[in-house]
Amino acid sequence: MNFASVIVDVAAKQTDRAFDYSIPQQWREILVPGMRVIVPFGPRKVQGFVVDVKLETDVKRTKPIAELLDLTPVLTPELLELGHWLTEKTLCFKISAFQVMLPAAMKAKYDKKILLQSGVESSQLHSKVQPYFQHTSEVMWSDIEKSESVNSFYRDIQKGLLEVVYLVKSKGNKKTVKALRLAQPPEHVKQLLQELPKQAEKQKQVLEFMLVQEEEVAQRDIMTVLNVTSAPIKGLVSKGLLHEVDMEIYRDPYANRDFIPSKPFPLTDEQSAAIKPILRDIENHEHDVFLMYGVTGSGKTEVYLQSIDQVLKQGKEAIMLVPEISLTPQMVKRFKERFGSKVAVMHSGLSAGEKYDEWRKIQRKEVSVVVGARSAIFAPFQHVGIIIIDEEHETSYKQEENPRYHARDVAIKRAEFHNCPVILGSATPTLESFARAQKGVYKLLPLRERMNKSALPKVDIVDMREELRDGNRSMFSTLLLEKIRERLERREQIVLFLNKRGHSSFVMCRDCGYVPSCPHCEISLTYHRYQNRMKCHYCGYEEPTQTACPECESDHIRFFGSGTQKVEEELGKVLPEASVIRMDVDTTSRKGAHEKLLTKFGNGEAQILLGTQMIAKGLDFPNVTLVGVLSADTMLNLPDFRAAEKTFQLLTQVSGRAGRHHLPGEVVIQTYAPEHYSIQLASQHDYDTFYLEEMKLRQAHRYPPFFYLALVTVSHENVAKVVSVTGKISQYLRQKLSPQAVILGPVTSPIAKIKDRYRYQCMIKYKLEPNMIPALKYVVNQYQDQMQQEQLTITIDLHPYSMM
């Protein structure tokens, strides 16, 4: 193969295609699609992905590839295919589609070294390779890449005699420790042992210890086991009896944790009925999408675990997605207890190095299950046997920047390729998924009962308007306080849920109505009491809190709304005896904080867990018998057609945290809109009626699942420019699309300005529009120059989850 087609790491329209390069002689047998290379591109050198190798090219004069970054492909043929599919589906650049599949540490520059695998003698290597390993067990790639022996090295790597290690220059380095192995054959060492002088007692101990070791041993382990210093070891190295090497150790985020192995639980009749069709698909290598629609606490996880077990028995692999970090500690625990070291974990709470190591375990086939957030869907497995998406209604499965993919679509695409089942699990599925299940596109697997037959919690709705009329101005209704006191006396635990962080939502002058807002974004500032500052949650701008109104100079400037810090303070006043753990973005920003706080609560070190969205789902504490929702309607007032659906899902999920074991649970929902159907039906745990109600509205207003949506957002520092460009785009789309398509706009975005850039949008509602993708691609091409030269931004989201 003489030429390679390479996608270069330059995200621009003109470069969004493969460029052909000639392959230097020494790499012709080595290079395969899926490897990363460094190529000359204009005046500089850039990284790129090889997507094809071929014998001839139409390009008159090709430049040669400058460097090989990988010696084993980082993208499998399936993931390369998937990259092309993502580009079409999300209208992103090919390079963005490939980059999103790799851990962040791999986006840096590299050095590489070749290591002699442990237990391999240099005499087993190819004759051209042997000289390099006469006195060492590692060779830098830069020392050999220009030599004649490159192909021979490659053959030995393929045979597993040598291993390639990437040294990332900036981040994601491998973690290594000093290790030792015998530098001479064991017979020879035994002979020398006899000849060592009497005073070399410690050296003898070390040699005797090393004679029984089959692999290299970390120096610190030898020192601990034999209780020796490093001196005898250094002596043996200088005598040429021991050889020092760097040994890779994985950065294991769960290293100092013991997981007690668990056995599968016997399934209930409902669970058995649900797992049967899944096992049949696994057995027959068939692809179906199952929607496991089970009430909170109905034992979906056990069905997942037993399905995965079946997949592993066939020698295949499993991908399990959970919504972001909050679910991960408890989920990881269940998976590690069941499958031990076969599990890799990938989520945003890990460092770049830890993520890189987990990804390497998958690539090296050392694990067969990955549990992780959205990006784990791209795990480089080659024999996927099942993909599970738990809490499939979660918006965190949709990526909000390029490529704007939804993990569910990627999962179904990969499962079609591998002929395996996909399970989408949720107590409150998205309307789109439930509608597909009703039509028979997905197969519905209902679980309507909780595990130990425990009843769903009893829910009380409190009208906060009534509380105000009765003179109660606190955040807690009389009923909720009464129930909290009861629980505190009985030593049971309570979860209090609030839909935001910070202390108060905003600050307002009661005399003139002035609200301080961010000078760079059209959004009011949020008050954070601990620093006594007001912050913008979009661009990070902050300023000190004002004591007098800058407009009318009145000192009647007050805080409105309530944040987690303020609730914690109030709790301290009304219930000084209660111990509270607060969980929000501010208290969990440090690595591992999340898990620490949950463990403390699980151990009963606090009676009240107060938190934002992150505590709403997936948590399972036997002693929690009361859940209080302090403000149920914060989401109902957002300019988003999914507001009612998100409110219903959230309330149902939060309620599901109560009474999951033998103690009965209760829920109190405080709201200013008690008659709203999403709140009423959530209190009755009635998803089916909610689905019918909401579907009527969606049909009337032409929203998904009856119509598809696309959102085009334009932003620029000059407002006139934004208005004119959005107007032209809307006009062009009206000409190109059929009269059935509804085009709304141009209008200002709900948040009209972020970071000094004005934002306008136009929304398209459509059913079948074959011209849709070509028309949108044309729009992006037309404005390409302005986007590069004038800082104009046009973003297109084909299935928007956030309307902001």
Image (cartoon, rainbow, N blue to C red):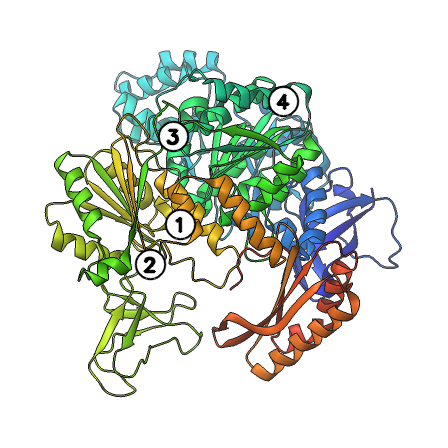
For badge 2, the amino acid type reads Tyr
Which residue is label 1 attached to?
679
Depth check, mark 1 against mark 4: the one in front is 1
For badge 4, the amino acid type reads Ile
Q: Residues within 10 Å of mark 3 (few under 14, many from 20)?
A: some
Instruction: Say which label, 2 or 4, has the lower sequence index.
Output: 4
Q: Which mark is residue 672?
A: 2
Residue 12 visible in image: yes
Which residue is label 4 attached to?
282
Picture quarter containing residue 33? Answer: top right
Q: CA distance from mark 2 to mark 3?
A: 39 Å
Residue 715 at what x, y percent from top left?
58, 73
Q: Nearer the viewer, residue 440 or 78?
A: 440
> Circle 2 — which element?
loop
Callouts 4 and 3 close, C-beta under 8 Å: no
Q: Which mark is residue 333?
A: 3
Residue 708 at what x, y percent from top left?
66, 54
Quadrant in the picture for the N terminus? top right
Q: Residue furthest left?
A: 577
Depth check, mark 3 against mark 1: the one in front is 1
Q: Which mark is residue 629?
A: none
In this view, 667 is above or below 212: below
Residue 93 at what x, y percent from top left?
68, 57
Q: CA distance from mark 4 to mark 3?
A: 25 Å
> Circle 3 — which element?
helix
Q: Nearer the viewer, residue 36 or 119?
A: 36
Q: Nearer the viewer, residue 600 or 448?
A: 448
Residue at 29% across / 72% down in the picture?
507
Instruction: Say which label, 2 or 3, has the lower sequence index.
Output: 3
